[in-house]
Image: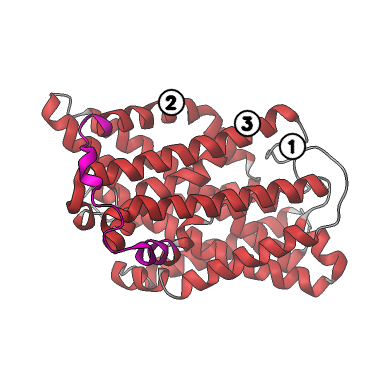
């Protein structure tokens, strides 16, 4: 799960967006975003180490019931917006790479229904998909990485920092909204099973996700050079397609596209679950009744559906992502950082991210 949260957006969407903003320095902006991920993961580690049995909601409500509602309300806004854009992006990915003669909306609706089911039944439903498909999906992605590396030219990354460092930092800041999915981990506080093996698995997942993201971002620039700034968003599949098309194995690209689609869908489920959990905390606290779960999942589904219907213009979305969404994301990240510092301490070892 951690690998998916770290890597999917940074591979499918961010390289092209960053290249449009900062050219050859896109992979350096990606390094900065991965550094933010490392900070979030470390904060989660410290918060869990302080008190693995205390949920985030209990910690906040213990200080002030109103504070807990406010913080979870902010998290709900963030995760709803993030889930909306993830569903929108997954639908666009399918439209661009698999079925470009049909509308992406029916596929987005299927993702929403699947996400609502995952939110109602709990994250284990989505986690089982990861367990079943994870190995095969990772193998296909690594194969795509090898194809891309074979056709890359390292000289394309030159000159480095042609416009200096400020644009690199600026591009990273503009798209930080798409790079804070690890905030989901904080919803697992108090809902995890301690264990050394699973903690190692979480750290390994983060390291692998960061490494894959960085390699794809670097190879995207090395493959396309200055043309990277003019490429469409779904760069990894396109890199692989362009290389293998000349090798007589054109249909292998469909396998890679399906693998990326599956990963994007699973990530949508995680984000919809996080949004529903946050909404449930606002209206029902830590109540776990079917009614609370159903209403929370329904509220999130209806809001995301409305956003998909009324906010489907990509140019407009790109504007608000690097505008108001950016500030929402920065505010949420700052709040989480403060929360990690004020949580009550209790000696314990780090554990897994598997819900009870």
Mark 1–mark 3 CB contact (< 8 Å) = no
Q: Nearer the viewer, residue 327 or 4?
A: 327
**Marks 2/3: CA–CA distance:** 18 Å
Q: Residues within 10 Å of mark 2 (few under 14, many from 20)?
A: few
Mark 2–mark 3 CB contact (< 8 Å) = no
Q: Is residue 342 left or right of residue 157?
A: right
**Residue that badge 2 annotates:** 136
Q: Residues within 10 Å of mark 3 (few under 14, many from 20)?
A: some
**Marks 1/3: CA–CA distance:** 10 Å
Q: Secondary structure at mark 3?
A: helix
Q: Nearer the viewer, residue 175 or 93?
A: 175
Q: Identify the colour scheme used.
A: secondary structure
Q: Earlier in the sequence, mark 2 or mark 3?
A: 2
x 59%, y 65%: residue: 299
In the displayed structure, would residue 184 be above or below residue 151? Answer: below
Mark 2–mark 1 CB contact (< 8 Å) = no
Q: Earlier in the sequence, mark 1 or mark 3?
A: 3
Q: Nearer the viewer, residue 91 or 291?
A: 91
Magenta-colored stretch includes residue 341: no
Of circles 2 and 3, the one toward us is 3
The reply to whether residue 90 is in sight is no
x 87%, y 43%: residue: 347
| Residue 220, x across and y down, in percent | 28, 44
Q: Which residues are magenta?
A: 149-172
Of circles 2 and 1, the one toward us is 1
**Residue that badge 1 annotates:** 351
């Amino acid at each position: 799960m951690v690998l998916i949260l770290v890597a999917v957006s940074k591979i499918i969407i961010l390289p092209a967006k960053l290249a449009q903003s900062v050219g050859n320095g896109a992979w350096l902006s990606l390094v900065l975003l991965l550094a933010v991920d490392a900070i979030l993961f470390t904060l989660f580690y410290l918060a869990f180490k302080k008190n693995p049995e205390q949920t985030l909601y209990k910690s906040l409500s213990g200080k002030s019931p109103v504070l807990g509602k406010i913080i979870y309300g902010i998290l709900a806004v963030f995760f709803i917006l993030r889930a909306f854009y993830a569903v929108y992006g997954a639908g666009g990915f399918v439209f661009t790479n698999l079925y470009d003669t049909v509308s992406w909306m029916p596929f987005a609706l299927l993702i929403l229904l699947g996400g609502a089911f995952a939110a109602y039944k709990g994250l284990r439903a989505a986690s089982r998909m990861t367990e079943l498909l994870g190995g095969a999906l990772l193998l296909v992605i690594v194969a795509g990485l090898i194809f891309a590396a074979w056709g890359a030219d390292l000289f394309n990354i030159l000159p480095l920092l042609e416009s200096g460092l400020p644009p690199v930092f600026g591009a990273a800041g503009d798209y930080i909204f798409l790079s804070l999915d690890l905030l989901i981990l904080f919803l697992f506080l108090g809902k995890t099973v301690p264990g050394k093996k699973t903690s190692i698995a979480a750290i390994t997942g983060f390291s692998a996700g960061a490494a894959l993201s960085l390699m794809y971002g670097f190879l995207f620039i090395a493959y396309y050079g200055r043309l990277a700034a003019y490429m469409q968003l779904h760069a990894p599949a396109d890199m692989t397609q362009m290389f293998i098309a000349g090798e007589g194995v054109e249909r292998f690209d469909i396998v890679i596209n399906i693998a990326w689609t599956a990963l994007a869908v699973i990530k949508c489920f995680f984000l919809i679950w996080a949004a529903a959990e946050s909404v449930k905390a606002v209206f029902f606290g830590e109540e776990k009744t079917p009614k609370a779960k159903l209403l929370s999942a329904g509220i999130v589904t209806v809001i995301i559906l409305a956003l998909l219907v009324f906010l489907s213009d990509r140019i407009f979305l790109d504007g608000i992502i690097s505008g108001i969404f950016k500030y929402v994301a920065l505010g949420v990240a700052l709040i989480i950082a403060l929360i990690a510092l004020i949580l009550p301490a209790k000696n314990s070892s780090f554990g897994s991210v598997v819900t009870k």
